[in-house]
Image (cartoon, rainbow, N blue to C red):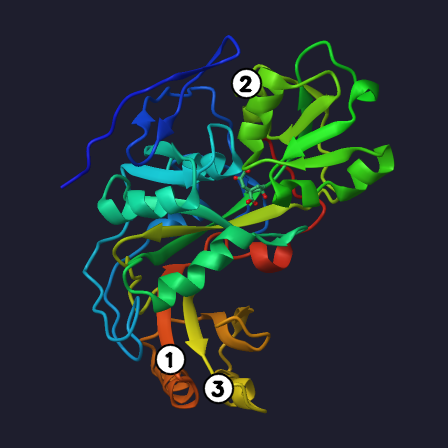
Amino acid sequence: MRPSRNTTGSNSGGHLRERVVCGDAGTRRRSRPDLPSAICRPGNGAPIRNDARNPALKSLGAGHGRVSGPGGVRGQGAQARDVRRPFAPAVVTYHGSAGAFAHIACRAAFPRARAIACDSLLQVIEAVRTGTAEAAVLPCENLLAGRVPDIHLLLPEIGMASEIGLTIVGEIFLPIELHLVAPAGRSLDQIRRVHSHPVALNQVRRFLSARGLAAVEQSNTATAAALVRRAGEEADAAVASELAARTYGLTILERNIEDNPVNMTRFYVLARDPVVPALHEPDILTSLLFELHNAPGALFRALGGFADAGINMTKLESYLVDGQFVATRFLCEFEGHPERDDVRQAIDILARHSTRHAILGVFPMHATGTRTRADASLGGVQ
Ligand SMILES: O=C(O)C(=O)C[C@]1(C(=O)O)C=C[C@@H](O)C=C1
């Protein structure tokens, strides 16, 4: 059963801001025929446009299957339901407002879905948990700024706290182009304060420090743009997408202010039920959370099976647990399906050397070349 939603709209300084708010708050949605084409990077390295024929985006939806095995999907022993791919949710949700990069990622990966905005990460999770949305798109890391903190507070909970009940079903790589935006009539030399999401501000540090601009953190790039439009003084500008500039009626004072033109954010796609690729499919990633006793060699022994089997690890994160400065919880991602014999054996070895483990998701890689082939020729419009 789906929870009911109320419909509201809010007026931001004469500029109608329409949004869907998850939870009890309210909903109203405006369709955006002028949404930009995100550029994704397919396996052959050539930038391609985002549309329904985009093979890289289709990688979110190839094949179907089940997974079992040590730890199971989403916690110890949980059985995956046989959700069939292609995974084509009708409603997806994200944290932020229209024009945020998470919104752009939703539209790029699921062009036919309704994308609904949530004011907080908790509301995003609740929307998926309760069925208001079938999937959530959440940023996890950026090439220039590194980890996106919010989801890294959440991921260990997803793995270890069964009540959260979400699983990773996909990933999206989105090129990020950041622009300095302000209401028409303002000039660059008037600007003293720049509002944006902290991760976006970290991607333009050189630009800000070269001009002596103060960074002001906002909950996402699009709300920063809306705020500057609604309540900004002459000295205020925002760092946001071109879509946000259009959505909130701002002009671009300076284009592409990111510190490096090769700039990309990786997003996770989370859903309530696993959508597990078939065993025979190529380019599968498994995301695994595990905990160790803090002892010499514990990590080495836990991961030894992966090294011996030649299984490529694409990510290893560590987290502090129980208020102590010792890393005993890890998130790793590796290439391979957990039902493949060598992967199963490596996970068995990890299970023997760890105190707990849980598979957070098994999903097809998006744009397989992206991890290794990002280069300065990457272009993109947003
Ligand atoms: O604020 C936004 O626009 C977001 O979607 C969040 C976010 C992030 O958290 O990294 C997403 C992508 C960009 O790297 C900057 C900000």
Q: Which of pointers 2 and 3 lies earlier in the amino acid sequence?
A: 2
**SS state under label 3:** loop
Task: Give the x, y percent position of residue 246.
Answer: 56, 18
Report if residue 4 is visible in the image. Answer: yes
Q: Which residue is mark 3?
A: 293
> Quadrant where the N terminus lies?
top left
Residue 356, disc: 1
| Circles 3 and 1 in contact, beta carbons < 8 Å | no
Q: Which of pointers 1 and 2 lies earlier in the amino acid sequence?
A: 2
Task: Give the x, y percent position of residue 154.
Answer: 44, 57
> Quadrant where the C terminus lies?
top right
The local crowd at label 1, few if under 14, some if 14 to 19, many if 20 or more residues have their Cα within 10 Å, is some
Q: Say which amino acid is labelled 2.
A: Tyr
Point out the residue furthest to the left here: 1
**SS state under label 1:** strand
Q: Say which amino acid is labelled 1.
A: Arg
* Spatial CA span between label 1 and label 2: 47 Å
Q: Say which amino acid is labelled 3.
A: His
Q: Which of pointers 3 and 1 lies earlier in the amino acid sequence?
A: 3
**Residue at image x 21%, y 55%?**
83
Viewer-closest of 104 and 381? 104
- In the picture, measured across the screen, residue 49 lies left or right of residue 344, that is right
Residue 248, disc: 2
- In the picture, measured across the screen, residue 164 lies left or right of residue 139, that is left
